[in-house]
Structures are given as structure tokens and as C-alpha cells.
Image (cartoon, rainbow, N blue to C red):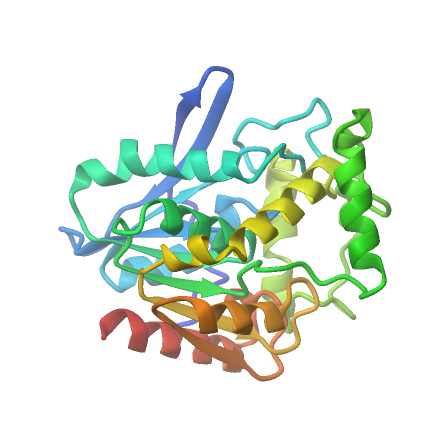
Amino acid sequence: MTDNNTHSNKEIFEYHYFSPKKNLKIRYGIAPCLKEPASAIFLLLHGQSEFIEKYKGIARQLQEKGFQVISPDWRGQGLSSRELENRHKGHINRFDDYVDDLEALYLRVIEPQGLPVYILAHSMGGHIALRFMSRQPLKIKKAVLVSPMIDIVLPVMLHPVLKLLSKKLSKTPFAKKYTLGSRDYSVKKAKFKGNNLCHDPEKYWILHNEIAKNPDLALGGVTWGWLNAAFESVEILQQDDMIGRITTPILMISAQKDSIVSSKAQEKLSGKLPNCSFLSIKGAFHELLFEEIGINRQVWEAFNRFVVE
């Protein structure tokens, strides 16, 4: 397996925009298949505060496997429309908005091609993918969810307090204010040593290097409104009728040392989903697709076995 995460070729994606509704622009990238015609489409869905450019190396690996890749910037992220005047604030009113945008992209850009569609999704992207597959059970052939955000990791005592607080504040002007400890993006806060995202220094800096090239990609922390929307969507995802509708074959890959999202919640949900296999990767941090080569190889080997089966 070639490790192409650090691939610097700028021409992997062609960038486009569409407007699902007035005053909203969603950017998406298309990485055409290298061996035309494409056998299938991979929807590549990134996490909170990320953007298409970070995933150029991942897209290249999918291209080399014979897929066309389509990847959106979520609203409020990347170069899609931001929700607030301060573009650094990660904000959303409800996670349904993300799902609506993905549905609109699917209907406009993906479905007309008439090809089988797969999903590779990370973190919040995995959460949105599950919500989408519950709404559209027959649209996706298979989905690989890496470190999906089934629940957020918070200290046990703080979890119920923050849940209640965010619920109350989201109904006030505080909805658009940063949560405690959140602030605008600053590269000065980025340090590889002691980070809890990945073990590979070169891959750790991909996001920050892309922001240095285009500062408009930067996103800071989240608002109380975003946090409340996340808590509400986590609850929705636990509902039995929601889970029962997700019949797509899923491979859920969990990072054993994830301190961002809950690996316990991932394992629990995978046991309830009608058609899901679960894999935990020992010693891995949250960003499984950007981990050191030994961990990364395990992810792609599992991916290959599952997708080709």
C-alpha cells in the first residue's frame, strides 16, 4: 500500500458550488477516477472543523482503487457558506441542516451519474452519514465509518451539566457565542508533541499547512448552539427506529485511544445496527486516516477487505 496522505498534488480535486437554498453555498470537490470509466463513487465526508483540501491524499488513494471521489465542505466549514459573521465560529442550529445539504448534493450531483455509491466518513462526517443512511436506506452500497461521532467524550461529571447548559443557552443570544475554552483558530496553539489526534508529525501538520495557504479555510472552536445541536443529534441517533432503518452494510473502525469521540458508544451502536462490523485499532488516536503508517495500514487493509467483499 502506498501511503499518499502527504500527497501535495493540487489538481486532485475540481471544485464546484451549488445552492441548496437561498443565501447558502455548498462547496464540493470532485476527484475524477484515474481509470475511466469509474466503477463507483466514493462520498468522502470529513469531520468538524475540517475541509476538502486536508483529504487530498485520501482521495488519491480512492482514485487509485478505481473510484471517483466526491467530497463536500459542510455548511459553516471550509469554503462553504459560514453561519456567522465571525467565520471562525463553528456553528449550526441543528444537525438536520448537514443531512439536508448532503441529501441535496446526492440528488443533484451523485444520483444522476447512475453509479454505485460508497461512503468513507470520519468523525462528525460518520455521524451525518448514519443520519443520511437512516433517511435514505437504499442509496449507499457500503459505508466505512472511521472514528464516527456517536457520542462526544466529556468528563463524566461535566456531560449532563454541559448538555443542560447548552440546551438553555441555545435558546438565547448565547447560542452564537463560543463554548468555554473555545476561541478563534490560531496556528500558535498547534503543537504535535502531546497532541491527541495522531502519531504522525507530517500528517498532523497537513490541516495547518493548508490553512497557511488559504486562511479562509480556518475554523476555531464551537458555539453553544453547535454543542446543543450535537447533543440533540446524538440522542436522535440512539433511537431504535432510527437505528433499525440503517440497513446499509457498515464497517465501523474505532481508535482505541480516542479522546474526542466515544469508542464505547461506537461499539454499542455497532452491535445494534442491522448490518455492521466493528474493528478497534490498538493504540490509535482519533484521526485514523492520518495515523502513523502501521495503524494506517491496518485501516486500509480492513477497508479493502470490506469494500471488495
- Say whether residue 169 is left or right of residue 114: right
- Say whether residue 18 is left or right of residue 202: left
Q: Residue at x 58, y 64 (%)?
A: 203
**Quadrant of the frame with the C terminus:** bottom left
Give the camera-side residue of 115 and 10. Answer: 115
Give the camera-side residue of 35 and 268. Answer: 268
Whether 151 is drawn above or below 257: the answer is above
**Quadrant of the frame with the N terminus:** bottom left
Q: Residue 194 occupies which quadrant of the picture? A: bottom right
Expressed as whole percent of the image width and height from the top left, the position of residue 234 reads: 59, 52
Give the camera-side residue of 77 and 213. Answer: 77
Expressed as whole percent of the image width and height from the top left, the position of residue 285 reads: 63, 72
Whether 231 is drawn above or below 282: the answer is above
Numbered-mark total = 0
- Say whether residue 50 is left or right of residue 257: left
- Say whether residue 150 is left or right of residue 244: right
Whether 102 is drawn above or below 277: the answer is above
Give the camera-side residue of 252 and 158. Answer: 158
Expressed as whole percent of the image width and height from the top left, the position of residue 21 reads: 44, 20
Q: Residue 263 occupies which quadrant of the picture? A: bottom right
